[in-house]
Image (cartoon, helix red, strand yellow):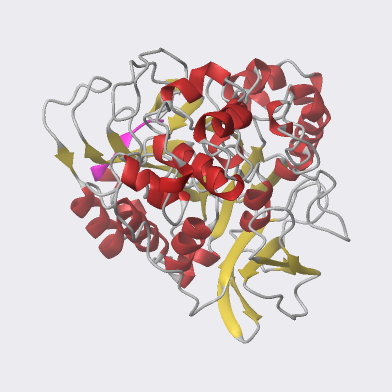
Amino acid sequence: MHKTVALLVSLAFTSAVAIDIDLTIYKCSLCETIFDKVIETGIPYPETCDSMFEKVDKICELLDTYINPADVGGSGRETCIKAGFCPDEGGWYPPIDTSRLDIRVAKAHGEKLGYDKVRVTVVSNETISDPLFTYSAPFKYRWTNMHLNTGIATVTPGSTTTLTIAGESFDVYVPVEDAGTRGIIVGDPCFFSKFVVCEFASDWNMFNNTIKLLDAATAHENEVSYWMMLGDNFYDQKGEATQSFFSSLSKKSAATLFGTTPGNHDFWVHSAPKVWVPADQLGHGFMQYYGQDTAAASEDSPFDFSVDPDASHRPSVKKQALPAADNFFSYYKIGDTGFVTFSGAHSYEDMKHEFVNACNWATRENPKYVLLQSHWNEEGYGCEGAMTTPAVYREMAALPECATIVPKMKYFMGHEHCNLVTEEGIGYMVGANGMGGCGEWGLPVVDTTSGDFSVYYFLLYVQPGPKNNAVAPVDNFVAVHSCFRDNGVSNCYHLATKWA
């Protein structure tokens, strides 16, 4: 999320107009998108910009630099570097490591399969023939250079299950049902600035340090049962940065139970429907890459591909180009904790029946705690008021089917780039992971192994600014990482603040 209202004063920003999207964050990516189109069509900048954004919020006035197509060199990006819109740098992230399979392991959707089932997904550059996979095909609509290979596997809870896929082995651990668990929550992670400015990407070495923390946390056997991301996953329109990150994780981290939910930037890279561009993934790349087992999955296909995002002009303004809501709706149990994840970009009415189903399921399965996880903390940026995470929590509390579940429920969200307790004992925001905002980076760990619901917050970095009370920079990364690596997460709580 970026909601700064600012007078935009920078190269080529000649109109000081306050709007609800700070274009200084997106100027490079927008410029590149526009001038790629200028090069393709030969139509000059002003007409091209107006045709793409329909004069929404005076975007084209704010991007008010004309470059004659005759002066355009090579590509839109080269043109925008020349114009001063984009930094003259490369190497946004390391090359994709193809030395091992790119794997995701997610719990099976609770309504359909037993506790001992997981969905295993491998993303590759070609389809993989393996008995595990019941679906193998190129990605549809977006990120189409990738191939999706996925299927359901049976594991033995409480023991390590070794899965061998195309000759490569992965160890998967699912805790005993109703046992205490420990999990890591990450929201709004960034490490490069091609599409959206990641303010602390370099200063805090976000790419390498995020991987170091996750690998150190998961390295100790059964210390961490799962890790989750709350959307705006790397602010990635094209998918290459996402692949680079996951291919750089240790094999142990990659095979640890993983869950996620989409954010606004996973639909529209510039943050909202009104700045939709044709290359936006609109959640289609996201849902296939992360391989969650959702309400949309069937025997024939893991997802509902019925929505073609390119079926009409500017469809995402009305959000008609987004995949069906069920593609992002899932509920499942890990140990003693139930999880309910959903997309805030869809309407409550479209998903009300699924919230009812989730509560009926949780009543039957009786987890000790239920974590509601989504992205938005407030309406806007593609989210209706009824679909913010706190609003859905309240809506569920009013459903008769959820009466016995609500006392067990907590919620986690991102979107605003701060990490804090938003509702004592109930609501938590995890959005400060490299982006500007509250000027900090931290990692919360949810722990129910003691029989109580606890959240330990490890503060890693702070840069003093208007949204925090810091008087000097804070750097706890080495201490926390070293402790995770040498002792395991549970032996490092003395370095954390207890949120719950």
User: On the rendered structure, is 449 left or right of 150?
Assistant: left
Percent across and percent down for residue 136 are 76, 70
Q: Quadrant of residue 275?
A: top right
- Can you give x and y, in whole percent of width and height, for residue 483 in the image? 25, 57
Work out whether residue 152 can be spotted. Answer: no
- Is residue 295 visible in the rendered structure shown here? yes
**Which residue does the image show at 48% across and 80% down from the upper left?**
99
Q: Quadrant of residue 143?
A: bottom right
Judge left or right: residue 472 versus residue 380.
Answer: left
The answer to whether residue 13 is above or below residue 242 is above
Residue depicted at x 81% and y 28% = 350
Most foreground residue, 199 or 194? 194
Q: Residue furthest front?
A: 70
Q: Position of residue 63 (x, y in %)?
A: 43, 28
Drawn side of residue 96 relative to residue 108, left or right: left
Q: Nearer the viewer, residue 185 or 16?
A: 16
Up/down of 428 relative to 202, above or below: above
Image location (x, y in percent) of residue 103: 58, 67
* Quadrant occupied by the C terminus: top left
Q: What residue range appears in magenta? A: 495-500
Residue at 56% across / 36% down in the picture?
263
